[in-house]
Amino acid sequence: MASTAQLKTTGILMLIGFFVVLGILFSPIFPGITAGSKVNGLDYLDNFFNSLAKSSAYYIPEQIQKAEKYKGQQFTASLKMKSAGEAATVGQMFSVNQISATVDGDKVKVSGDLGAFATAALKDADLMYNNDDKAFQAKYGLSAQQVVNTWYLAMGVLNKDLTKAGQEEQGKFILNCMSKAIEPAYNFYQVEAKPVKQEMVMLTAALAFYVIYTVWYGFGLLFLFEGLGIKLEDH
């Protein structure tokens, strides 16, 4: 059985090793999401898991297919936006996609084909999912974030208008477009999608490291405390 001095030494060495690794994890020596950039280990793992999450959150093709059902269905709505500038951007985007839009202050009166409108927004979401900012600059003169965020805001108002008008099915479809396509595309912008099946080795290694590292710290404290004569006892 190890003596208290041996336990204390073992605990100290384990904790020293733990904090050395911790220092490495917090050092910006790991590859970032852009070429040539460096990040710390926590950001690297965060980017890695975001890449896996992005790959599993790609529902845009399904939503585009569902939009076919609504092609030919006409809709008219008056979208009250938060500001006149926001309304002007909404009007510009509708017009670019051949959907009638009249801007009056912070309101945009729109009318057109619901399926065609949804498809246009979903295709923009797909471009953003694939990190293609240049396409937005060419089409709208705006950034990917501006366009997709504006689609999200406009769809949110449209969903409420359709629901109030008794068109719950259409409103639910627009809501699904927001949650399954627009929002993931925006949240995962500039993240490289990686299929889980192709990253199983790295995924397994990351999870194993987390478990081993946590246990390592726990045993280091345990040995140190026992070496110092501090023990947990039941009474």
Image: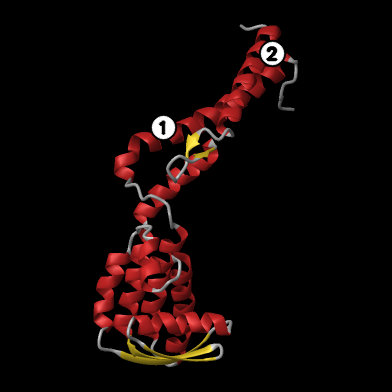
* Quarter of the figure with residue 140: bottom left
Pinpoint residue 21: horizontal percent, then vertical percent.
57, 26
Q: Tell me the tag on residue 205.
A: 1
Left or right of residue 80: residue 222: right
* Quarter of the figure with residue 28: top right
Q: Which of 41 and 105 is in front in this view?
A: 105
Q: Name the residue under label 2.
A: 8
Pinpoint residue 202: horizontal percent, then vertical percent.
38, 35
Question: 10 Å neighbourhood of mark 2: few (<14), some, or many (≥20)?
Answer: many
* Quarter of the figure with residue 158: bottom left
Kind of element beneath mark 1: helix
Callout 2 amino acid: Lys
Kind of element beneath mark 2: helix
The residue sitting at 30% across, 70% down in the picture is 63
The residue sitting at 47% across, 60% down in the picture is 187
- Colouring convention used in this rendered image of the protein: secondary structure
Query: Do the CB atoms of the residues marked 1 and 2 lie less than 8 Å apart?
Result: no
Of the residues tagged 1 and 2, which is closer to the observer?
A: 1
Question: 10 Å neighbourhood of mark 1: few (<14), some, or many (≥20)?
Answer: few
Pinpoint residue 30: horizontal percent, then vertical percent.
49, 35
Q: Tell me, yes or no, if residue 189 can be seen here.
A: yes
Q: Which of 88 and 196 is in front in this view?
A: 88
Q: Which of 125 and 160 is in front in this view?
A: 125
Q: How many marks?
A: 2
Q: Tell me the tag on residue 50.
A: none
